[in-house]
Amino acid sequence: MIETIPQELRDHILEFGRVQWGATAERTAAEHIAGFEKSLRLTREYYNLEDVPVQMHGVYLEGSEIVMAHTGTSPNSGTRARIMVGLWNYIHDELTARREPSA
């Protein structure tokens, strides 16, 4: 399975290390939006993207605009979304192949 992952994605995973799941405290929609705006601002400042239009990367339900996860606007965000999509789809395909046929 590892061989099917493009080398650039493998290198990215090794460069950044292990990850973990996390969550914010419970917040209202307005509070989440304010936190998201702060996160976007910090990313723009860190990567010096103040006046540059950038894409918002993420993981979407196939064939829809339903967002499963945003990975952000940094130069690394697209790569991270591709990694997440590849792993999700690999697991999905494995589970589908192992599913017993319905009667």
Image (tube, helix red, strand yellow):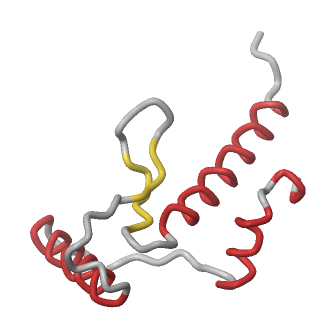
Image point 14% across, 69% down: which residue?
28
**Residue 83 visible in the shown view:** yes
User: For this rendering, which residue is in front, 22 or 82?
Assistant: 82
Q: In this orientation, which residue lies closer to the viewer: 22 or 13?
A: 13
Numbered-mark total: 0
The residue drawn where x is 33% and y is 82% is 43
- Residue at 79% from the left image edge and 56% from the top image edge: 5
Asked which quadrant contains residue 46, the reply is bottom left
Extreme-bottom residue of the structure: 46
Residue 49 in the image: x percent, y percent? 29, 78
Quadrant into which the C terminus falls: top right
**62 sits left or right of 48 in the view:** right
Is residue 25 visible in the rendered image? The answer is no
Depth check: give the residue in front, 19 or 83.
Answer: 83
Question: Most extreme residue toward the top, as rendered?
Answer: 103
Residue 56, percent from left and from top: 35, 59
Identify whether 88 is placed above or below 53.
above
Image x and y of residue 26, in percent:
25, 75
Instruction: Find residue 79 and report its image quarter.
Output: bottom right
Q: Residue furthest front?
A: 51
> In the rendered image of this protein, does residue 37 appear above or below residue 84?
below
